[in-house]
Image: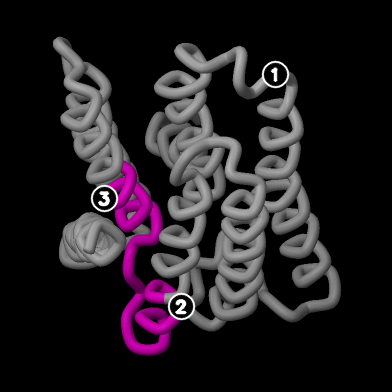
Amino acid sequence: MGRNPAKYISYIFHPLWMPMYVFLIFFRLQFSSHSYEYGNSWIYIFLLILLNTLFIPVLLFYLMRKFELIESLHMENRKDRFLPFLVTGIFYLTTGYVLNQAAVFQNLGHVFNFSAILVFIALITTFFWKISIHSMAMGAMSGFIIYFTRLHFFETPWLAYAALMASGFVGYARLRLDLHTPAQVYGGFLIGAATFVITLLWLLN
């Protein structure tokens, strides 16, 4: 059997990786021009994000599977999503709180608070609809990148174009793997993007 590119796309753009991508964008936008202010603090922030949003949640997911609290780590069943989403949302909120208190990268804490909101929306939606979490994450990520591209007046907004293209590839991958319907993919993207816009307007007021 040949390798399925759709699986690799789903892994590369898995929602659990999104916080790391966000951090790298902040690193590029802020650290490069204010490195003297941050010193080595960015290393501790990176480790905090890595532990709180990736390593610890994944470890807890494996423990949930081991103790049969969920049937599969892929969470294809809607019932398998409740506990992992709840845990992920709590860790995002914790990360956002710590980052806001540290005040190292401006607004980075708000990004993780927003991510928690998005996870809880997905959790609630899961009760009645198997929405595409990958598409939700890409919708939010695309909105975030487009906003910061315009905010920093990039002459070549290649990152925004790349985010929209990646969203298309992710949507295709989820459909190709027969894990979602078109409505679940498009709906996920729109909900993710709309949640970002609404949260942004709320923070700016």
Look at label 2 and name its amino acid: Leu
Where 48 falls versus 40 (above or below)? below
Q: Quadrant of residue 163?
A: top left
Mark 3–mark 1 Cα distance, whole angstroms, equals: 33 Å
SS at circle 1: loop
Res. 181 in view: no
Tell whether label 1 touches label 3 (CB within 8 Å): no
- Residue tagged 3: 139
* Disc 1 residue type (three-letter): Gly
Q: In the rendered image, which residue does mark 2 sit on? A: 123
**Rendered image: mark on residue 117:** none
Say if mark 2 contacts mark 1, CB within 8 Å: no
Name the residue: 84% across, 69% down: 66
Q: Residue 48 versus residue 71: which sits nearer the camera?
A: 48
The dominant secondary structure in magenta is helix
Q: Residues within 10 Å of mark 2 (few under 14, many from 20)?
A: many
Q: Which residue is mark 1?
A: 39
* x and y, in percent, of residue 105 in the image: 53, 36
Residue at coordinates 56% horizontally, 68% vertically from top-left?
89
In this view, the residue in front, 2 or 28, is: 28
